[in-house]
């Protein structure tokens, strides 16, 4: 993307662009105009063609051609880029989109390739037999395993790496989808070893990730986690993905419901038993993004409720989701201590199918569970349960989904407990108010945000100002500063944010610098960053300068440490603890050296 930005900038002369909006008058080496960003009749705005910058001497606006368009058109960075690119007749997104779609395609191809390797290994007569035995014991037949593309990642540590080399599959791409990792001393290793591999496929049936279960009895069993999922990537997001959705979605469309279970083998067993609208989340609790996916396929979600620990937390979360979503949430209870897989094996298809089809509406379920028979006579437990439910019900605009669902729940609770609806509503309002008060802390953060947005260069302490300036002007040196100065040492919030941004880029493996930061900097902070970079650009020895500044920070740290020690020394001597005082004194002297 940085290339695209540079090309558009090169094709957009600031004088040309600004003169499309304002009347510019030449004044020496620069041009003057009446500033459009504050109320004025004098020409305070200076446009400098050599440096490709504008600056208003009255209101302080400062920046380059892109930020000028952002400000005057009141658009964000990418819209401003679109405008400039169209004006210049070039497309800044093409290359980036091409690269990105190319990368995604390569990842999909690599994931599909890996899925075939794992599947072949499972059915390899010699190699795969331990994993086949395990799956057979769980009651899964070949037809089901084939339908889900289940496979086997052999142990050893370099099995997939070797296969990839033999077949010229790029290891970097396998790394991006979380299948291989880099060794410290160079070389590659398999991330999935001695595991049964469940491919996670998108709704179109393409593998995008893997869930691996360690084989019972594996030598690695005690050292490695039982389940391991591939990391999120450009094609895979754990918090959104539903395991089995490619095979369940058609049945969900027909029946109108989709059931959510916990384990991969639960999904496989249900499908094997002919109960098709069944999927699993990827070890994460049901969330709003899942519901967004589900409502494309079915109107009703069936949560399969597991009565042991964690079940109630799941219901609580679901109740919060339910009120905010236009999907119907229902709950199917299983016999205590049974997961769907066990139950199917023991009792056959009938009972599970009946439980799913006859799932209870979440409201009824919650009332039945949290307000058991007789609770209306036990004031304190009842009060607690009411509080819990009322805190979960959102206040919506009258007539909205939130409002309707909350009102329904209030009506039912009122009838069940004999409490007037009005009292319940009043309590809900109070809880909502105190929840909002809890959020006022966030307003303070926003105020700091505003302050960093208006910070001028001169307000920043010199050491902090110069350090950020050098790094912005010479982003190749960010790595030298990382670890030698911490953002927390900065007093000025705006400078601290810029340093944090640069370090974040470095950590994320991006190239640090303003180009990559543009889309996340507000116009005010961008102006500051550009100004600082411009200030530091002319320096003849940036490396030396940076060293001096880092040494300055170190001296400051030492001074601070000594000051604290001396303070404690005074306290201790006043308290009369001579041994402790001597010890501290030695430290002070050490530090002074
Ligand atoms: Zn101005």
Image (cartoon, helix red, strand yellow):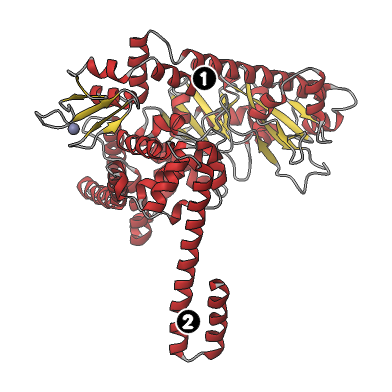
| Quarter-of-image position of residue 289 | top left
Horizontal arrangement in the rendering, residue 130 relative to residue 427 (left or right) = right
| Quarter-of-image position of residue 203 | top right
| Labels in figure, total | 2
Residue 344 position within the rendered picture, expressed as x and y whole percent measured from the top left: 66, 32
Q: Which residue is mark 2?
A: 569
Name the residue located 14 percent from the left edge and 28 percent from the top edge: 43
Rendered view: 379 above or below 254: below
Please tell me how crowded label 1 is: few (under 14), some (14-19), or many (20+) other residues with Cα within 10 Å.
many
Disc nearer the start of the sequence (2/1): 1
Rendered view: 437 above or below 476: below
Q: Which residue is mark 1?
A: 252
Residue 32 position within the rendered picture, expressed as x and y whole percent measured from the top left: 19, 25
Q: Residue furthest top?
A: 89
Name the residue located 40 percent from the left edge and 29 percent from the top edge: 519
Horizontal arrangement in the rendering, residue 204 relative to residue 384 (left or right) = right
Residue 364 appears in the figure? no
Which of the four quarters of the rendered structure image does ligand 1 lie in?
top left
**Camera-nearest label, 2 or 1:** 2
Question: Which of the two residues, 222 or 575, is positioned nearer the viewer here?
Answer: 575
Question: Which of the two residues, 338 or 74, is positioned nearer the viewer here?
Answer: 74
Question: Which of the two residues, 72 or 417, is positioned nearer the viewer here?
Answer: 72
Q: Residue furthest right?
A: 126
Q: Residue furthest left?
A: 41
């Amino acid at each position: 993307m940085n290339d695209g930005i540079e090309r558009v900038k090169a094709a957009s002369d600031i004088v040309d662009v600004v003169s499309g909006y304002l009347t510019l008058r030449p004044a020496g080496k620069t041009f003057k105009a009446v500033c459009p960003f504050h109320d004025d009749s004098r020409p305070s705005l200076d446009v400098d063609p050599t440096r490709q910058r504008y600056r208003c001497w009255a209101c302080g606006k400062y920046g380059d051609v892109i930020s000028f368009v952002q400000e005057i058109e009141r658009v964000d960075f990418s819209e401003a880029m679109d405008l400039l690119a169209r004006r210049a007749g070039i497309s800044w997104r093409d290359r980036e989109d091409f690269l990105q779609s190319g990368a995604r395609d390569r990842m999909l191809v690599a994931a599909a390739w890996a899925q075939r390797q794992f599947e072949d290994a499972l059915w390899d007569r010699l190699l795969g037999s331990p994993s086949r035995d395990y799956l057979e014991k769980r009651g899964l037949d070949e037809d089901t395993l084939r339908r889900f593309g289940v496979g086997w990642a052999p142990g050893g540590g370099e099995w997939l790496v070797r296969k990839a080399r033999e077949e010229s599959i790029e290891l970097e791409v396998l790394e991006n989808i979380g299948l291989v990792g880099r060794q410290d001393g160079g070389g590659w290793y398999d991330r999935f070893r001695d595991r049964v591999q469940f491919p996670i496929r998108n709704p179109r049936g393409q593998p995008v990730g893997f869930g691996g279960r360690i084989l019972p009895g594996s030598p690695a069993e005690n050292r490695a986690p039982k389940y391991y999922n591939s990391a999120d990537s450009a094609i895979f997001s754990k918090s959104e993905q539903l395991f089995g959705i490619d095979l369940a979605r058609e049945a969900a469309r027909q029946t109108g419901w989709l059931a959510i279970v916990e384990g991969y083998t639960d999904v496989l067993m249900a499908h094997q038993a002919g109960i098709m609208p069944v999927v699993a989340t990827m070890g994460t609790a049901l969330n709003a993004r899942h519901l967004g996916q589900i409502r494309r396929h079915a109107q009703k979600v069936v949560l399969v409720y597991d009565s042991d620990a964690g079940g109630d937390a799941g219901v609580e979360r679901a109740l919060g989701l339910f009120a905010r979503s236009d999907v119907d949430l229902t709950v199917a209870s299983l016999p205590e201590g049974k997961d769907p897989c066990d139950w199917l094996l023991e009792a056959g298809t009938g009972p599970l199918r009946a439980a799913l089809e006859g799932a209870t509406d979440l409201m009824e379920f919650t009332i039945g569970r949290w307000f058991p028979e007789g609770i209306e006579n036990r004031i304190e437990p009842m009060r607690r349960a009411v509080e819990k439910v009322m805190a979960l019900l959102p206040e919506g605009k009258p007539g909205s989904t939130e409002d309707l669902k909350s009102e329904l729940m209030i009506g039912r609770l009122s009838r069940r407990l004999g409490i007037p609806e009005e009292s319940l509503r009043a309590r809900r309002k109070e809880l909502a108010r105190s929840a909002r008060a809890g959020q006022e802390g966030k307003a303070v953060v926003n105020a700091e945000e505003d302050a960093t947005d208006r910070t001028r260069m001169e307000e920043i302490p010199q050491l902090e100002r110069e350090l950020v300036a050098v790094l912005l002007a010479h982003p190749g040196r960010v790595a030298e500063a990382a670890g030698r100065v911490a953002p927390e040492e900065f007093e000025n919030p705006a400078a601290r944010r810029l340093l944090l941004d640069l370090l974040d880029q470095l950590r994320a493996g991006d190239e640090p610098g303003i180009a990559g930061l543009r889309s996340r900097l507000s116009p005010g902070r961008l102006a500051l960053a550009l100004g600082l970079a411009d200030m530091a650009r002319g320096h003849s020895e940036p490396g030396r300068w940076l060293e001096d500044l880092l040494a300055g920070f170190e001296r400051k740290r030492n001074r601070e440490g000594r000051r604290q020690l001396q303070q404690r020394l005074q306290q201790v001597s006043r308290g009369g603890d001579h041994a402790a005082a001597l010890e501290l004194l030695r430290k002070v002297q050490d530090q002074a050296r």
